[in-house]
Image (cartoon, helix red, strand yellow):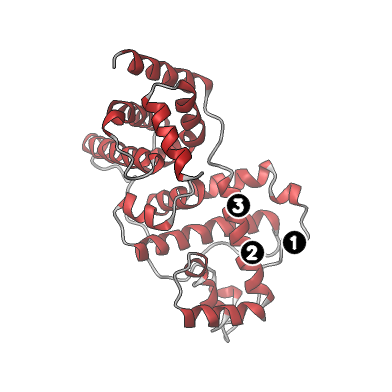
Amino acid sequence: MGETSVDSELEALKAGDEAAFQSLIQRYHSSMFKLAMTYVGDRGVAEDVVQEAWLTCLRSLDRFEGRSSLKTWLYGILVNVARARRRKESRILPFSSFWRRDESDSHRPTVDRSRFGSDGLWSDGPSSWDNIPESKVLGEETVQQVRSAIDALPPKQREVILLRDVAGFEATEVSSLLGISPANERVRLHRARAAVRQKLEEYLNPTNSEAAP
Amino acid sequence: MNCRQVVELMTDYLEGALSAVERARFEDHIAGCDGCRAYLAQLRMARKIMGRLAGEPVPPTVEKELLEAFRSWRSTR
């Protein structure tokens, strides 16, 4: 979408155009909800968080000058609301293991060593998916595998891959939304993408892959 | 560069974060390696599938509530 149409979308919203608001909801709500789940873990609470983010967006709309894109601004509000809610929830549940330490920032290999020979070349390399019908590769069952692979990621990886690959933000926008360095963003993204690919391989080439490391 | 090293550079490659020298070495390896080429294609496919998760349908009750909130915001300005 070009800059002009984004500006006109903001103008339409400010003018009270309901169809413009509905279009935003349809484009962003589902990935906002997934992102909120990363912080609060409970569906009901996540729904509240997303709703609060939308309401905050409406309340602040007249003051928003469009220095960032509407989308970036909206997700920024969501991240703030969700983080505030997580802090509140963690006071209620101090021993919640929800945001426990994980290996998201580790540089450990993402592919099982057993798949390489001692020379570092593939001994059990991935099989191309070119011969699998596209209706299967892009089918609903495959999409479900991807959903569950993302759901199983540690929160730090999940928030990055949701913003970068699901919501489609540029890498620089992701690191600034989350307040992490671009290098750190890539480390987390790399682990997350490797895990999603692994899950797809287990589904599409069941005889090919060993368990994830 | 061997395959074990190349797979760990795949994200930096896709994100355009490799130096020109690293990028050239990466591409040299990929050109001659079926396994790494398949791995890279699979990462791209994973991204393509993930992109489809963005616009999943909004539950009708949720959409209705948000549109009502919009109308009430509009009426109080």
User: Looking at the image, can residue A100 be seen?
Assistant: no
How far apart in space, not on screen, are marks 2 and 3 (Cα)? 10 Å
Q: Nearer the viewer, mark 1 or mark 3?
A: 3
Residue A170 shown left or right of residue A56 in the figure: right
Determine contact: label 1, label 3, CB under 8 Å: no
Please state which amino acid type lies under the numbered disc 1.
Asp
**Mark 1 vs mark 2, CA separation in Å:** 9 Å
Disc 1 vs disc 2: Cβ atoms closer than 8 Å?
yes
Q: Nearer the viewer, residue A172 or A152?
A: A172
Rounded to the nearest angstrom, the CA distance separating label 1 from label 3 is 15 Å
Q: Chain of mark 3?
A: B
Q: Give the residue number, with chain letter if any, for mark 3.
A: B48
Reading the image, the residue beneath label 1 is A130
Q: Which chain hosts label 2?
A: B
- Please name the amino acid that badge 2 sits on: Ala
**Quadrant in which the C terminus of chain B is drawn:** top left
Determine the residue positioned at 58% across, 78% down: B27
Residue at screen point 60% across, 81% down: B29
Rendering coords of residue B25 (x, y %):
54, 83
Q: At label 3, which amino acid type do we have?
A: Lys
Q: Residues within 10 Å of mark 2 (few under 14, many from 20)?
A: some
How far across and down, in percent of the image, does residue A106 sit? 38, 66
Rendered view: A203 above or below B4? above
Are the residues flagged by discs 1 and 3 from a single subunit? no
* Residue behind mark 2: B41
Residue depicted at x 32% and y 56%: A101
